[in-house]
Amino acid sequence: MLMKEYRICMPLTVEEYQIGQLYMISKHSHEQSERGEGVEVVQNEPYEDPQHGAGQFTEKRIYVNNKLPSWARAVVPKIFYVTEKAWNYYPYTVTGNCSFLPKFSIHIETKYENNKGNNDNIFGSEPRDEETEVCFVDIGYDEIPERHYKKSEDLRYFTSKKTNRGCLQEGWINTQEPIMCSYKLVTVKFEVWGLQTRVEQFVHKVIRDVLLLGHRQAFAWVDEWIDMTMEEVREYERTTQEATNLKIGSFPPTISISDTPLPSSSRSGPNSAPSTPLSTEAPEFLSVPKERPRKKSAPETLTLPDPGRRDSIFNGGCLPSTSHKTPSTS
């Protein structure tokens, strides 16, 4: 298990970011999706928790394969996706990811506060575990994957016309008003001997890149969403999600990832934030086959569905690539 706490400051207030977050996630998912790859929204509806109150539950399928590194593709089937479930009780959210891979999970707790990222006890009354690495993410000056770089989203040069905020200078976190911080406690587990450290470090690298890009875009797009009401951003979210699902294409899953039903408001919730169910049993196609007579005409093979056939049952996917240095600007 590898746990890190990410802190991402923004030149916004927590109240403003509630709208900006919803807008950014919808637009970002649409931009990063194409046929067979990206983020498909399965459920998005209100949810009531006895401890945290009214919130929103979402379930997404993140199609993962083509952009995995070669060493990762060697240990996973050719086609699969990851399920993401999130409970948003803003300014507190909890997100869990699971896949059919046994003993693999991602859990993220998020809290938002109007400060510079200096709250060391935000996730509990006890002092933070010294083994948990704190990673400050600078949306203005940290490097992003080269393929995601856009000069219009480079916050060193961007100024919002509606808020007059922007052109972030070195050390902007110490001088910016208003300012808020997204605190994200991320736990990655991949309990497979020989691969655990490498996979957990890789997943954290991907998560950090996604957080950096998403928060950069949330502010770079501020003039698009700053005047929206909650009703307007929910309508934008709905229409964009429909367009994204059509863009990806709907295919019945080859592999059943989670049969856990969505908790309803009539059920009594847990005392703490919901956790993501994860089966530790390997699927049948990964189990060792029983002894059977071997055909002499050909070796035994494992055949996956052919993505080229319309009658095949399959899915595809994507995951951000590794980071490159931000291109220099003239």
Image (cartoon, rainbow, N blue to C red):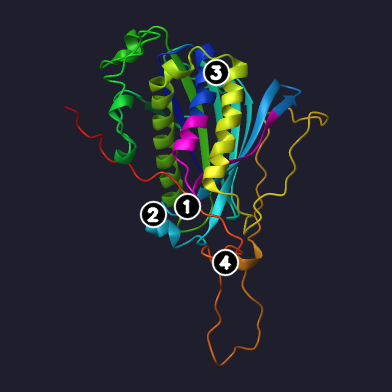
For the residues labelled 2 and 3, the Cα–Cα distance comes to 34 Å
Residue 305: assigned label:
4
Q: Inspect the image, locate mark 3, and give the three-letter code of the amino acid beneath it.
A: Gln
Residue corresponding to mark 2: 69
Q: Which mark is residue 196?
A: 1
Task: Return the disc, 2 or 3, that comes first in the chain's sequence.
Answer: 3
Q: Which mark is drawn over residue 18? A: 3
Asked if the magenta segment contains residue 28, the reply would be yes
Cα separation between marks 1 and 3? 35 Å
- Residue stretch rendered in magenta on the structure: 26-45
Determine the residue positioned at 54% across, 39% down: 244
Mark pair 1, 4: CA separation: 29 Å
Mark 3, residues whose alpha carbon is within 10 Å: few (<14), some, or many (≥20)? some
Question: Marks 3/4: CA distance?
Answer: 42 Å
Where disc 3 sits, the SS reads helix
Q: Earlier in the sequence, mark 1 or mark 2?
A: 2
**Image point 54% across, 92% down: which residue?**
297
Residue at x 69%, y 30% (from the top left corner): 45
Distance between mark 4 and mark 2 Cα atoms:
22 Å
